[in-house]
Image (tube, rainbow, N blue to C red):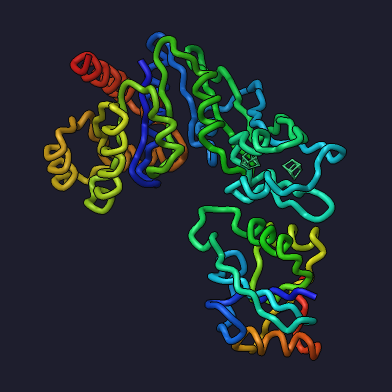
Amino acid sequence: MIVCITAKGEGAEATVEPRFGRAPYFVFADTEAGTFVSVKNELVDAAGGVGPRSAQVLVDHSATVLITGQLGGNAATALKAAGIKVYSFGDAATATQALEKYTQGGLSEIL
Amino acid sequence: MKIVVASGKGGTGKTTVSANLAYALARRGGVTLVDCDVEEPNLHLFFPGESEKKGVPVPVPAIDSERCTLCGECGHFCRYGALTVLKDRVLFFSELCHSCGGCTLVCPVDAITEVGREIGVVTTSHPLPGLTLISGVMYEGEVLAPKVIADAKEEGGDEGRVIYDASPGVACPVIETLEGADFCILVTESTPFGLHDLDLAVRAAAALGVAAGVVINRSDGEDDAAVTFCQEHDLPVLMTIPFDREVAAVQNRGGLIARDLPRWEERFAELWDEVARHCEVKV
Ligand code: SF4
Ligand code: SF4
């Protein structure tokens, strides 16, 4: 399963980022392989439509779960339609911590 | 002759100036007043009447799911995020679409055609003899104000005297409103606070080659800052409207000073003549 975590930087130890569409990085964690792939978000400074465009990035990377802080309405529509579940990272500070909490069932669902 | 009434910022009484000017001209041979503040048109409040409506359509993509191979091209092309290609279908966010037509071009299997979607209406009414009022009205949540403005201006035509009431501030709707106009009346208050915004508006008009002049509204008699600004920028002060008790009383109840107070009808007619003189000087 591929879990996407919005982050301020690259890699497993990156600090989590609350904004979805404007997150500097998307960290994709492959839970079976135990690998982390970081993708720079080209849309940080884009004018508009960042929510659905970021959802597209998740679809392209076959993510089925997203861990982030907050979501806009269009992003929510796109993610829901794509069947991607969304959780809030709560008090987790890094991508790894967020993933751990998620695996333990300790994160609350936003969508 | 087509003139724009604009202001650098909201709350300067721009709409009142437009309405009074239109009233005076309606009684002197006729005028077309076009409300280009499509997000919040309010000139109809001064001139109520039965109106005819015409839809404002914009082209948006319609995707033929039979043909679509979910290749993802359109989703990656659209920089506005209006298309998201999922594993089983393409999602379209109509309110994000800027109608650029690009997705139709990039689709490798011709699965996209353009269909019309209504983002607003243009209404036309004849509330007074000599006055044609045209209002552009953009629907809630829509973003393509310039398209609604363009349609409203088109409806207003090129003949005779036309007044375009712009939206407050200086953003792309105002640029669209200025396009093709002969003159721009900028309405400001006498306080120095609005001068920065006024400066932006002056530069926007200049960039489009539209000559401008200033109407000082709600003047408390201390217009030094505004007058100096106009001198520095070589802008004529076309009219000064004092904020005395009489004027305030009429405006507070939504009335028109050109109709309800003596002499003001003539003064607004003179404002138009003054503008006409400046336009001749220009050509
Ligand atoms: S017409 Fe342009 S803005 Fe609209 S969906 Fe297609 S590519 Fe995006
Ligand atoms: S470009 Fe055409 S074929 Fe490809 S996903 Fe879009 S609509 Fe479907």
Residue lying farthest to the right in this orientation = B66
Q: Residue at x 26, y 38 (%)?
A: B202
Side of B249 where A29 appears, left or right: right
Give residue B230's quadrant in the image.
Answer: top left
Side of B85 where B145 appears, left or right: left
Q: Nearer the viewer, residue B54 or A11?
A: A11
Image: B223 above or below B136: below
Residue A73 seen by the camera: no
Q: In this figure, what is the number of numbered marks?
A: 0
Q: Quadrant of the C terminus of chain A?
A: bottom right
Side of B238 where B138 appears, left or right: right
Q: Nearer the viewer, residue B11 or B263?
A: B11
Give residue B212's quadrant in the image.
Answer: top left
Q: Quick check: which quadrant has ligand 1?
A: top right
Q: Quadrant of the N terminus of chain A?
A: bottom right
Image: A79 above or below A97: above
Q: Position of residue B183 (x, y in %)?
A: 30, 24
Q: Position of residue B264 (x, y in %)?
A: 31, 25
Q: Residue at x 66, y 87 (%)?
A: A96
Q: Nearer the viewer, residue A23 or B54?
A: A23
Q: Nearer the viewer, residue B135 or B23?
A: B135
Residue B102 seen by the camera: yes
Image: B199 above or below A62: above
Q: Residue at x 76, y 49 (%)?
A: B91
Q: Position of residue A67 (x, y in %)?
A: 69, 76
Image: A11 above or below A66: below
Q: Residue at x 64, y 89 (%)?
A: A91
Give residue B137's quadrant in the image.
Answer: top right
Q: Position of residue B134 (x, y in %)?
A: 54, 23
